[in-house]
Image (cartoon, rainbow, N blue to C red):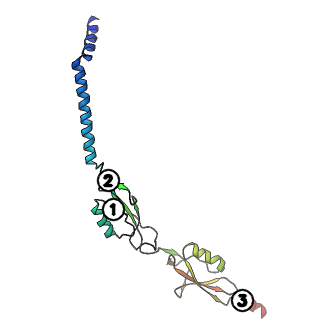
Amino acid sequence: MNKVVDFFKGLFKFIYSKIFLIQVVIAIAMLAILSYIALEWLESTTNHDQRIVVPSLSKKNLDQVEKILSEKDLRYEVQDSASFNPDYPRYSVIEQNPVPGSEVKENRKIYVTLNPSGYRKIEVPNVVLQTRRQAEPKLKAIGFKIGTVTYKPNMSDQVLELRHKGKKLEPGSMLMKTSTIDLVVGDGKGLKLNLSN
């Protein structure tokens, strides 16, 4: 029992001694110095303080994009093309991420979306034998333009034919979005002529 008591007395005496306190202070100082060195090393290897402002790549082609980004130690990756936008040159950047003005680290990858070469092709719906009032909104809703409307003697006032650049257009054909479709519509007078006979 006396040995245990003596042990704890000796332990407490050592803990409160100057030698122990000096060693604790040295250990804390060494830990602080090592932590500081480790943080500085991490910051230097991860370019923590280095920031590059992302330039605007809007309306630039890929050659221009590569040149601009390589000068700033940045990279790029092309994402899927967007819907065609006539306000942007073909194959030029229409969107980018991160956005212009963002601050990024060196060697960061900038994702760019390119404007395609033109409008995509879409299917011409079957509006033959529908009234002009029904056909026009359907064609416009999916992106076509209505051109000339020609009337042909017929007892109905329905759409008889669709035409594109003077050629008859079959429903289900593929045309570029925003293409102009001409309508050949019955004049509705054929019925009156038949009744008068």
Task: Please tell me how crowded label 3 is: few (under 14), some (14-19), or many (20+) other residues with Cα within 10 Å.
Answer: some
The quarter in which the C terminus is drawn is bottom right
Q: Amino acid at mark 1?
A: Tyr
Q: Is 40 located above or below residue 62 in the figure?
A: above
Task: Please tell me how crowded label 1 is: few (under 14), some (14-19), or many (20+) other residues with Cα within 10 Å.
Answer: some
State if disc 1 and disc 2 touch (CB < 8 Å). no
The first of marks 2 and 3 along the sequence is: 2
Residue 189, numbered circle: 3
Question: Nearer the observer, disc 2 or disc 1?
Answer: 2
**Splitting the image into 4 quarters, where does residue 76 fall?**
bottom left
Q: Amino acid at mark 3?
A: Lys
The quarter in which the N terminus is drawn is top left
The first of marks 2 and 1 along the sequence is: 2
Frontmost residue, 167 versus 87 = 87
Q: Amino acid at mark 2?
A: Arg
Question: Nearer the observer, disc 2 or disc 3?
Answer: 2
Q: CA distance from mark 2 to mark 1?
A: 17 Å
**Would you name the residue on which mark 1 appears?**
76
Q: CA distance from mark 3 to mark 1?
A: 64 Å
**Would you name the residue on which mark 2 appears?**
51
**Splitting the image into 4 quarters, where does residue 196 fall?**
bottom right
Question: Nearer the observer, disc 3 or disc 1?
Answer: 1
Q: Taking 60 as reference, is 191 left or right?
A: right
Q: Is 155 located above or below residue 122 in the figure?
A: below
State if disc 1 and disc 3 touch (CB < 8 Å). no
Q: CA distance from mark 2 to mark 3?
A: 75 Å
Residue 132 in view here: yes
